[in-house]
Image (spheres, helix red, strand yellow):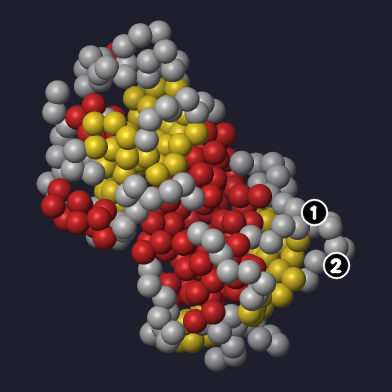
């Protein structure tokens, strides 16, 4: 049995190795994503897989998966990285590509698989975010939309991990509201699938000096962190204010424990893991400060403000 090979395999493997993520310890952010994917898709197993030359390795996993890697030649994800969109296998026993796969045979074998490729900006598929079930399964449109959006979040995390934050970003005049609005559009599919309302309020113009690619990734992470902890039926409310200083205000009802990026940026405690440490560094390099504005200590209602230097 041989796995298919993408036409850009050399570039794909080079991009994967440049991430410096293979064989690293588990990280909370990736673990959170597989938990959400499993919850949203109603599947007992979810994994972040990275497809190396001869193996697929699991950066994160939830469910009954006793190993950390499997040979590439028997990996469903080796087929999923051949495309640019979801690969869905409703019943593997009825699919000629997988009916003889050793992980399909037996009563507890794989029946359902859905994998969204982890695509870099240059089109390299590093692996997948996938969900798996031991029974035939189908996803509805909202679940597929959410799985695609969660896969984009995995790629964002991988980019943040490898990002080297310099003291002085390469700034230009940027509309802060535009950056935030674009990230919320990317996150809305996840919010809808989790029954969480995500709203955006805009006031006056909010021009700042920023490196848009880096700041956009950091803002995406900050908003997604709030979305992860918001309860079903809850709301994440985002406002972008232009005065007295450019500000992104975020409110949610996910409990009052500060995330790692927050404690790092506020100077309370350095982040232990690479992604929140990178996010705090990006925000700090843009002159951002964070302020808690929750009125009641210990309340599940949390509000914070990210303030940027005026243009």
Quadrant for residue 260, please give it. bottom right
What residue sits 71% from the left and 75% below the top?
Answer: 291
Q: Pointer 1: residues within 10 angstroms few (<14), some, or many (20+)? A: some
Report x, y in % for residue 229.
Answer: 66, 50
Instruction: Name the residue at the bottom extreme.
Output: 311
Report x, y in % for residue 29.
Answer: 52, 51
Quadrant for residue 58, please give it. top left
Residue 91 shows up from this direction? no
For label 2, the SS is loop
Q: Could you tell me if the residues under marks 2 and 1 are in contact, i.e. CB atoms within 8 Å? A: no
Earlier in the chain: of badge 2 and badge 1, it is: 2
Report x, y in % for residue 19.
Answer: 31, 58
Relative to residue 70, is residue 135 drawn left or right? right
Circle on res. 300: 1
Report x, y in % for residue 261.
Answer: 58, 66
What residue sits 85% from the left and 67% below the top?
Answer: 295
On the image, numbered disc 2 is attached to which residue?
295
């Amino acid at each position: 049995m041989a796995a298919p090979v993408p036409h850009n395999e050399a570039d794909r493997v080079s991009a994967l190795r440049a991430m410096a993520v293979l064989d690293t310890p588990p990280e909370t952010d990736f673990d959170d994503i597989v938990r959400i994917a499993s919850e949203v898709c109603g599947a007992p197993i979810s994994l972040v897989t990275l497809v190396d030359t001869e193996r697929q390795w699991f950066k994160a996993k939830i469910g009954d998966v006793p190993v950390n890697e499997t040979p590439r030649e028997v990996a469903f994800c080796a087929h999923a990285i051949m495309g640019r969109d979801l690969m869905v296998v409703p019943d593997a026993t009825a699919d000629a590509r997988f009916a003889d796969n050793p992980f399909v045979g037996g009563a507890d074998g794989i029946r359902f698989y859905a994998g969204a490729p982890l695509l870099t900006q240059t089109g390299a598929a590093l692996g997948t975010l996938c969900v798996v079930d031991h029974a035939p399964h189908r996803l509805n449109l909202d679940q597929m939309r959410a799985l695609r959006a969660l896969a984009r979040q995995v790629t964002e995390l991988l980019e943040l991990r490898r990002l080297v934050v310099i003291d002085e970003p390469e700034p230009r005049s940027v509309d802060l509201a535009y950056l935030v609005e674009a990230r919320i559009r990317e996150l809305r599919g996840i919010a809808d699938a989790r029954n969480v309302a995500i709203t955006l309020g805009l006031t006056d113009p909010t021009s700042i000096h920023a490196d848009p690619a880096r700041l956009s990734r950091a803002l995406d992470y900050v908003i997604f962190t709030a979305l992860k902890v918001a309860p079903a039926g809850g709301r994440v409310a985002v406002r972008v204010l232009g005065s007295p200083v450019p500000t992104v205000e975020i409110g949610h009802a996910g409990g009052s424990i500060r995330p790692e990026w927050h404690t790092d940026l506020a100077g309370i405690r350095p982040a232990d893991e690479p992604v929140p440490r990178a996010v705090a560094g990006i925000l700090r390099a843009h002159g951002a400060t964070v302020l808690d504005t929750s009125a009641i200590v210990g309340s599940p209602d949390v509000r914070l403000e990210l303030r940027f230097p005026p243009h």
